[in-house]
Amino acid sequence: MPDLKSLSQLLVEFRDKRDWKQFHSLKNLIISLHLETGELLELMQWKTDQEVIALQADPGFQRDLAGECADVLHYLLLIAEQNGIDLIAAAEEKIRVNEKRYPVGLAYGSAKKYTSLD
Ligand SMILES: [Mg+2]
């Protein structure tokens, strides 16, 4: 199983074989990432929570969900690659930031944003 770095390299090779880098400005990549998250959202459109829970046992739904998650990850990897972002390090750092923002004693069982915790 490839790690994020080798997956990013596979994706860059895929892009470069097709001469698509010319279309991949940061603006276009972020727009594309957002569009793909919209496709994830579309899987939820008009469904109740119970219907979504039932769909999670459907192999066709799982295939569509995995496909859209992959599209989102691909654009995120391309954004990171273009901007020299180590996604693992950035994600680990963000967990440390959120540990300070959301102390267990204040945030446990709460859906409040950190700015509203007291
Ligand atoms: Mg898609």
Image: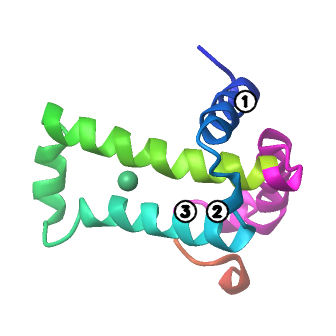
What distance separates the C-alpha of mark 3 from that of mark 2?
Answer: 14 Å
**Relative height, residue 92 to residue 29 (above, below):** above
Q: Is residue 60 left or right of residue 17?
A: left
Are the two marked residues, 1 and 3, in contact with CB atoms closer than 8 angstroms? Answer: no
In this figure, which residue is indicated by the disc labeled 3? Answer: 33
Q: Nearer the viewer, residue 1 or 78?
A: 78
In this figure, which residue is indicated by the disc labeled 2? Answer: 23
The residue carrying pointer 3 sits among few (fewer than 14), some (14 to 19) or many (20 or more) residues within 10 Å by Cα, namely many
Amino acid residing under circle 2: Phe
Quarter of image, res 52: bottom left
- Between disc 3 and disc 2, the foreground one is 2
Q: Main secondary structure of the magenta part?
A: helix
Give me the residue at 70% from left, 52% from top.
21
Counting from the top left corner in percent of width and height, residue 39 is at 34, 62
Q: Nearer the viewer, residue 101 or 79?
A: 79
Query: Which numbered dot is residue 9?
Result: 1
Amino acid residing under circle 3: Leu
| Residue found at the very far bottom of the displayed protein | 116
Amino acid residing under circle 1: Gln
State which region is magenta: 82-109
Q: Nearer the viewer, residue 11 or 44?
A: 11
Element type where label 1 sits in the image: helix
Q: Specify the color scheme.
A: rainbow
| Residue found at the very far top of the displayed protein | 1
What distance separates the C-alpha of mark 2 from that of mark 1?
Answer: 18 Å
Give me the residue at 25% from left, 37% from top.
62
Counting from the top left corner in percent of width and height, residue 99 is at 79, 56
- Mark found first going from the N terminus, 1 or 3: 1
